[in-house]
Image (cartoon, helix red, strand yellow):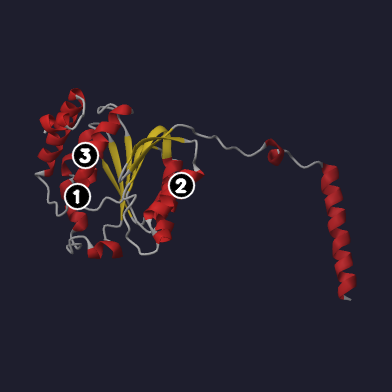
Amino acid sequence: MRYHLVKLGIPSHTAKHLAEVRAEFEGHAAQGQFKERWFDMNIVPWSVTFPKVFDRSDPVRILEIGSWEGRSSLFLLTYFTHGQLTAVDTWAGSDEWHYHATPELQDLEVRFDNNTASGADRVTKRKGSSLSVLPQLIDEQQKFDVIYVDGSHFSDDAIVDGLNAWRLLSQGGIMIFDDVMWPAYPRARANTAWAINQFLKYHTGEYKVLHAQYQIILQKKILFDDRIADWVKLPTAPDAISDSTTKASQSQQIQQQLLG
């Protein structure tokens, strides 16, 4: 594999790193019960991008939105040898997957557990819809260094996931949007691409693009500390309260006169 990567123009040291990571991952994956291999196309871009920000031994906090049967989860656990992974999924499948995925959904969560067994002590499962789980994580004031957004591909859901995930991402952290160009729905406005484009516009200037193909990988560069303005926090002066009360009383009297 290293030889082929070098022929593709990847530097020798990067190719060596990538080949080692892939071999380690495939060794773990061989012990699993995988029905799908969609994730494998991301091994090269992830292995090339992650070293720009993190070392493999860094104790990164990882949030995965949409874990399915755990192939991407296993790679993240393999790559980040001291990483802690929080996996968010219903493990019940979805309408869009009925057309493209294995119909064997009844044991999906069991497969996830088996497939991530080698790193089970570093996995926390949050079972449920990301639309409800992510706000819970925000309320818990949790923060993550790597967030992989691969949940619902319906634009309304995807943009909410993206905005919530950005609030959970630590400064300097990485966020990955998957399936950027996947046309799951006939109406363009309903697809993931629309949601991601709106997200990028909304957060313009706050990120650096590390990779952009079928996935977009961003690094959070600016963290705004948006606090309530001082004038909002100032106590109201007694005279202002008295004046406001008088005006309210006069207004009520006028209304009563008009109503008879």
Residue 180: x and y, percent?
Answer: 34, 49
Label 3: few (<14), some (14–19) or many (≥20) C-alpha neighbours in 10 Å: some
Q: In this view, does 11 lie above or below 185?
A: above
Label 1: few (<14), some (14–19) or many (≥20) C-alpha neighbours in 10 Å: some
Q: Which mark is residue 113?
A: 1
SS of the residue under disc 3: helix
Label 2: few (<14), some (14–19) or many (≥20) C-alpha neighbours in 10 Å: some
Answer whether residue 237 is visible to the viewer in this image. yes
SS of the residue under disc 1: helix
Q: Residue 176 carries which label?
A: none
Q: What residue type is labelled 3?
A: Ile
Gap between marks 1 and 2, in whole Å?
A: 32 Å
Choose between 90 and 10: the one closer to the eye.
Answer: 10
Residue 24: x and y, percent?
Answer: 13, 34
Gap between marks 3 and 2, in whole Å?
A: 25 Å
Answer whether residue 121 is visible to the viewer in this image. no
Taking the image as shown, residue 2 lies to the left or right of residue 238, namely left
Gap between marks 3 and 1, in whole Å?
A: 21 Å
If you read the primary sequence from the N terminus, does the residue marked by circle 1 or circle 2 appear first? 1
Q: In this view, does 186 lie above or below 114?
A: below
Q: What residue type is labelled 1?
A: Asp
Q: Which mark is residue 43?
A: 3
Choose between 182 and 116: the one closer to the eye.
Answer: 182
Q: What residue type is labelled 2?
A: Phe
| Location of residue 108 (image quadrant) | bottom left
The residue carrying mark 2 is 199
If you read the primary sequence from the N terminus, does the residue marked by circle 3 or circle 2 appear first? 3
